Amino acid sequence: MCLLLKAARFYRRRPAYYNLWMSTPNTPQDRLKRAAARAAIDHLQPGEVVGVGSGSTVNFFIEELGARRDQFPTAVSSSSGSTERLRAQGINVLDLNEVIASGRRIPVYVDGADEINASLQMVKGGGGALTREKIVAAASERFVCIVDRSKWVDCLGRFPLPVEVIPMAVELVSVRLRLIGGVPTVREGKVTDNGNLILDVAGLSITHPDSLEAEINQWAGVVTVGLFARQPASVALVATPEGVEERRAAGAAPATR
Ligand code: 5RP
């Protein structure tokens, strides 16, 4: 019992290096994810609120942030999972409404992607957090996308497109998705942080991501489509075994959105 109490006390007060050690990358892909996550630190502005996405790559980023929490003490989070991890790292998670109402900036949002193309348009939502991710991304000045090279694609759509839907509209939205050539499946056992369901849509070859995003987004019952095309990333940090490449959309002005 005494041992258990001691362990619990240690866990509560654990230093940042303990978390890093606990999740030491053990696969080549994990090493790439951590490399991309670490590279994102150079894009942040110390003292400012950091926008934080969700997913396994972002989990590495949260650990990197935790190791530098004196420089980056505050964040806005895109999911309950990320919030929990940020708090475990001693980072203060702020409410987005309060940040905006107080006039504070969120200069940078850091998130992963399921797919990203040369225009830095993305498919996101593999973890089901797409709606809050889009909200925090929209509230931020720049989007830094952190991925390993497996996420880089010529054409979006190989990864089934996630769509968050109000439960009563699942069949209605599925019918519409079939009409545009998609094969929707309800993600089993998943209820989003907003109490909704996710449809994963296979079979779409997404040649015009911006118009498809606009089209699906305006259907009754759709909360968010996991296409991030109308507001693409500002920069992609793509981890390869040779190093992390900083890629910008062709013709994009450097460091602006
Ligand atoms: C979660 C997301 C993630 O960014 C996306 O699924 C990539 O995740 P991972 O880094 O685990 O590959 O959109 O909703």
Image: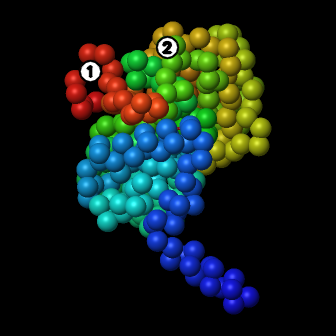
Q: Few, some or many C-alpha atoms within 10 Å of disc 1 (few <14, some 14-19, many ≥20)? A: few
- Which of the labelled discs sits on residue 14, or is there none? none
Image coordinates for residue 239, horizontal then vertical, percent? 44, 33
The residue singled out by tag 1 in the image is: 252
* Drawn side of residue 142 relative to residue 154, left or right: left
Q: Is residue 61 above or below residue 18?
A: above
Three-letter residue code for mark 2? Asp
Q: Is residue 23 above or below residue 252?
A: below
**Residue, far bottom:** 2
Image coordinates for residue 63, horizontal then vertical, percent? 47, 56
Q: Secondary structure at mark 1?
A: loop
In this view, the residue in front, 35 or 187, is: 35
* Drawn side of residue 21 relative to residue 202, left or right: left
Q: Residue at x 67, y 34 (%)?
A: 198
The residue singled out by tag 2 in the image is: 154
As measured in the structure, the alpha-carbon distance from the residue carrying label 1 to the one carrying label 2 is 18 Å
In this view, the residue in front, 71 or 30, is: 30
| Labels 1, 2: front one | 2
Q: Residue at x 56, y 37 (%)?
A: 29
Q: Residue at x 49, y 23 (%)?
A: 152
Image coordinates for residue 62, horizontal then vertical, percent? 46, 53
Residue 208, visible in the rendered structure: yes
Name which of mark 1 and mark 2 comes first in the sequence: 2
Q: Is residue 217 above or below residue 41?
A: above
- The N terminus: image quadrant: bottom right
Contact between labelled residues 2 and 1, with CB atoms less than 8 Å apart: no
Q: Residue at x 68, y 29 (%)?
A: 199
Three-letter residue code for mark 1? Ala
